[in-house]
Image (cartoon, rainbow, N blue to C red):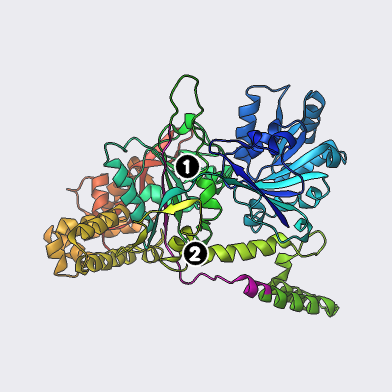
Amino acid sequence: MTTETYKLAEGQFLAKLEPFATKGLPTNSIIHKMVTGCGATTLELSFPRNSIIIEPNLPVIKGKCNKLNGKKRKHKIVQGVYEDVEVEHIKQYIGNRKGYKKILTTPEGFEKVAEAIGVSMYKDYFLLFDECEKAIQDVDFRGKIIDPIDAFFKFDNKAFVSATPLVPSDPRFKDFTHVRIEPGYDFAEDITVAVTNNIVYQLKLIFDHYENSEEDKDRKLFIFFKSTSRIRNIIKALKLTDYAVYCSEKSVKELRIADVEHAYDSINDKFTKYNFLTSRFYSAVDIDYEHYQCDPIIIMVSDVIAVEHSAIDPSTEAIQICGRFRKPEKIEGQPDIVVAKDIYHISNYNTKLTSFNEAEIQAILEDKRKLHAFISTYKPTSDIEYVNKFIDEILELNGFNYFLREKDGELNHFMVDNFVYTEQVKRHYKSNSTLIDKYKHVQHFKVETNSRYIHYTLSDQQLSAIKDNSSTVTVNDFVSQSVKDIMESEMENPWQSFNIAMLRYSYPEQIGIIEKYGLPNAAAIDYNINKILQQLADAKGLKRMLPILKYIQRKFIIGNKHSSAEIEAYLIKGIAETGLSDLKPSVKLLREGALLSERKTIGKDEQGNSIKGYEILGYVQSF
């Protein structure tokens, strides 16, 4: 592969740089534009030729179509192709379009484009695969992303393009030209890399820093995280209300079911104080200044203990994320608006991650290939079904099928590249220093001197052991031991207070019990919550209450949800059954024996109206 290099001036777009301005994007090339937002896709959309542009995600296509088409329906400039767009719609666009045809499609939608145009597209259209690294990064969970690849090589004019391309090992690329467009200016951005053993604590520290700053408190935070379940946990743990989550349509539905209401599947004007974005918004999507209108605070989060695939690659994804925020458009006669970014990457690390190098991977694949070939060649035929099934299971366990193309059984080079790439990225997350070291070698970033490893007494590893369905006794024991570790550690008092405060966010009931009893008093019994509860019960004369408390544990099951009316009805029966006629059947009485959620919507009545009530989270004591 030969290389051509061109220099780009600051503020210059490819439409103003030769030879691109005159000849357009070159064919049979992998274009490494190095900086995001320099106008490669924009150039192709305006260049005088028919174009098909493959974009990795739907939000990109919708965003560009909205920009270029406005409210046009009949005489659109560009045609977007995705799930709801059919072959007939594409044919109508081609028939109605008087100028050059510009078609934006997802990889999955490319087949519809091919059907609508026919074989003439190979000569009549330029095919551009945008954000081309996604073909390697996403193929393991989104196999159809490389469906257009065979067709790609049939086009007379074609190119891969990205600010962060990964060069495929597919031999059909060997005669391509590697086109490097290097900025002729200092383009590196400052970044603070915080490796820690507790993601939520570190996030909270950053959130508080900006919240408590008069100068910065009105700025918006954009948190990029690949896991919607962990995003939900963060929102709940930190009790965020001024938030928005941007994710897939499927995840929007799941989050709303889980009481995370402000979830959206496309960029809109609803940016709030805390904005969470998943991987479909990491690349290509333009976040325009008219939407964010501030100096954005960008926080990338990788939690490789809870969600291994949340690892963010400093060499590709981090660069793309920081490039999402478009500069304000220059308005004639008005001074330029300068946008400053504060950039963070928060991550934990996991020493158990594999990180095979390329030679090891090739050796693994060769061993798998040999076994697969041997079994496939000498596979016995049998009339006994379970024998054939057993042999198929051996082939499945060997795993080489994973690296073969379904259509013809040939080696899927993109799957191999994905394996190599994934192992390379995991290498940055195996210790508390490897991620920082990696960023120091990425020319797009300047690592701030305060980048370091930050240790907390309570770790992500410990927290991951406590699940939503863990028993009250287990949670009590966990919190008791955590408080003991914090209070008996040699850290300075402010850090003790901070750790206790963060525990309070996750376990308000348990910390509330200890604080009600008093930390000095709790120290005498090793902060044992179950012992504290017993002593509190004795002190309040709760022994008399045992019958009703046992009734509560029998009738109010953990995980069940009850309206106030249902609670009152159950307690009326309990009071009558236990003879404690001086008690009032109220939520307050229920709290004597059960841990309740905050009052929330628990369902709907026959008319569709919301029913408010409480969820049973656990019990104050175990009997």
Q: Is residue 233 left or right of residue 93?
A: left
Q: Is residue 154 left or right of residue 350?
A: right
Q: Is residue 88 above or below residue 484?
A: above
Highlighted magenta segment, given as a residue range: 338-362
Neighbour tally class for label 1: few under 14, some 14-19, many 20 plus, Cα within 10 Å: many
Q: Quadrant of the C terminus?
A: bottom left
Residue flagged by tag 1: what amino acid is it? Val
Q: Secondary structure at mark 2?
A: helix
**Camera-nearest residue between 248 and 100:** 100
Q: Is residue 342 magenta?
A: yes
Q: Is residue 260 above or below residue 309?
A: above
Residue flagged by tag 2: what amino acid is it? His
Residue 545 visible in this rendered orientation of the protein: no
Neighbour tally class for label 2: few under 14, some 14-19, many 20 plus, Cα within 10 Å: many
Q: Is residue 216 magenta?
A: no
Residue 414 visible in this rendered orientation of the protein: yes
Residue designated by label 1: 245
Which mark lies nearer to you, 2 or 1? 2
Residue, x 79% and y 23% (percent of image)?
98
Residue designated by label 2: 428
Residue, x 68% and y 73% (percent of image)?
362
